[in-house]
Image (spheres, rainbow, N blue to C red):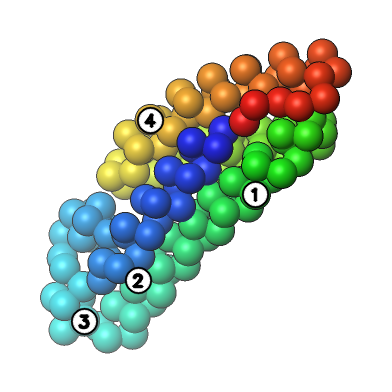
Amino acid sequence: MLLVNLSAVVLGMALIIQPLDPGAESFMGKSLAELRVFSPSVADWVWHENKESIFSFILLGVVGSSVTWNALRRGERWAWYTLVILVFGYDLVYIGIHAHISYLFYVPVALALLFPAVVGAALTARGIFSGAKQVRP
């Protein structure tokens, strides 16, 4: 679980420095500069929404890493449920929304993060529900 959350933080940090993620430009068919010529207010909105979604991705990774590192290692059940809801809920909704609008740039990334999340949830579930005092994240 820690690997998945830290991967989200690293991916988000890599994307936040770009003017627009590569998937958005291919989805719109225009670069941000071309869009700004057409409509500056729409270009500003697209830029803002892009940064906001990337920042929420980073924050979810930070929160998930913190819960994994602290509460999950102590064997607290609420931490396992929280991480399952955060990771799987966000990942599956993200895949569904982006597949629905045919914006498929991040779907392979989300699917790649889903496999280690399933493995991590399965490995930690055994320790959480068996009553172990310390669980490896």
Mark positioned earlier in the residue sequence (1 or 2): 2
Furthest-front residue in view?
Answer: 134
43 sits to left or right of 48: left
Q: Residue at x 31, y 58 (%)?
A: 14
Mark positioned earlier in the residue sequence (3 or 4): 3
Look at mark 1 in the image and give the residue it sits on: 66
134 sits to left or right of 50: right
Look at mark 4 in the image and give the residue it sits on: 112
**In this rendering, the label closer to the viewer, 3 or 4:** 4
- Image quadrant for the N terminus? top right
Within 10 Å of disc 4 (Cα), the crowding (few <14, some 14-19, many 20+) is few
Amino acid type of disc 2?
Answer: Val
**Vertical relation: 21 (above or below) 97:** below
Look at mark 2 in the image and give the residue it sits on: 46
Amino acid type of disc 3?
Answer: Arg
Q: Residue at x 65, y 42 (%)?
A: 69
